[in-house]
Image: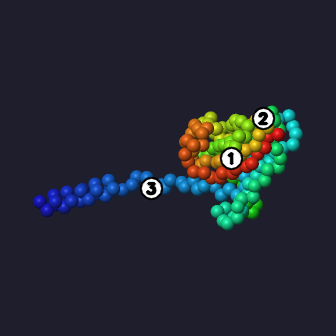
């Protein structure tokens, strides 16, 4: 009888031990947010001409200094521009091109372009992630009538896709920059 109790106890302990162990001890990889100090948006007019550059640079991140924002010129009415974005981490030397990482992790990223203040322009995505959803490191911007306002560029990390509306995108903001823009 003692043998049966001992075997029953041993079997019970073994079953409990095996059922409580984890079959998957591999931790999920952590995809940390990118450090982005500089966003440069270049707008090249179709058919040639002078490009316009919009840039924000914030070398101290959440530090006390405000970002430095530059806009190199005004948009021309009726002109379509090819837009490209470059993201840099300038806290390292040489600066790291974060754009490449965003494009490699295209399913986890999307740029959004938001207009404000009566700015008469339209934007359209021209590059997409591996599932055909908008990515936005490349786009077109078409200037309408003479106007002024703001163009806000927002990079979302792990947004809901497909989505073209920032308000419904979810995810975390990796970088957001607002530029004062004039169409003349």
For residue 3, which quarter of the picture? bottom left
Q: CA distance from mark 1 to mark 3?
A: 43 Å
Residue that carries the numbered disc 2 in the rendered image: 145
Few, some or many C-alpha atoms within 10 Å of disc 2 (few <14, some 14-19, many ≥20)? few
Compute the Cα span from label 2 to label 1.
Answer: 19 Å
Most foreground residue, 134 or 68: 68
- On the image, the x and y values in percent for residue 21 come to 36, 56
Q: Secondary structure at mark 3?
A: loop
The percent position of residue 81, horizontal first and vertical second, equals 79, 38
Q: Which numbered disc covers residue 108?
A: none
Residue 152: which disc? 1
Percent of width and height locating residue 79: 81, 35
| Mark positioned earlier in the residue sequence (2 or 3) | 3
Q: Residue at x 70, y 61 (%)?
A: 66
| Among numbered discs 2 and 1, the one appearing first in the sequence | 2
Mark 1 secondary-structure assignment: strand
Q: Is residue 177 above or below residue 163?
A: below
In this view, the mark in front (2 or 1) = 2
Residue 168, by quadrant, is: top right
**Residue at mark 3:** 25
Q: Is residue 147 left or right of residue 110?
A: right
Q: Residue at x 64, y 48 (%)?
A: 155
Horizontal and vertical percent position of residue 145 = 78, 35
What residue is drawn where x is 64% and y is 55%? 34
Give whichever of discs 1 and 3 has the lower sequence position. Answer: 3
Foreground label between 2 and 3:
2
């Amino acid at each position: 009888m003692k043998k049966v109790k001992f075997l029953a106890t041993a079997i019970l302990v073994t079953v409990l031990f095996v059922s409580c162990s984890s079959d998957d001890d591999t931790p999920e990889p952590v995809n940390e947010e990118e450090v982005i100090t500089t966003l440069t948006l270049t707008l090249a007019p179709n058919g040639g001409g002078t490009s316009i550059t919009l840039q924000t640079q914030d070398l101290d991140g959440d530090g006390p200094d405000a970002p430095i924002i530059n806009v190199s010129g005004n948009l021309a009415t009726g002109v379509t521009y090819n837009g490209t974005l470059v993201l840099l981490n300038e806290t390292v030397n040489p600066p790291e091109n974060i754009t490449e990482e965003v494009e490699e992790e295209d399913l986890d990223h999307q740029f959004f372009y938001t207009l404000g203040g009566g700015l008469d322009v339209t934007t359209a995505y021209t590059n997409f992630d591996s599932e055909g959803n908008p990515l936005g490191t490349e786009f077109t911007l078409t200037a309408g009538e003479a106007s002024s306002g703001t163009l806000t560029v927002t990079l979302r990390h792990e947004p809901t896709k497909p989505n073209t509306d920032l308000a419904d995108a979810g995810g975390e903001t990796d970088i957001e920059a607002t530029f004062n823009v004039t169409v003349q």
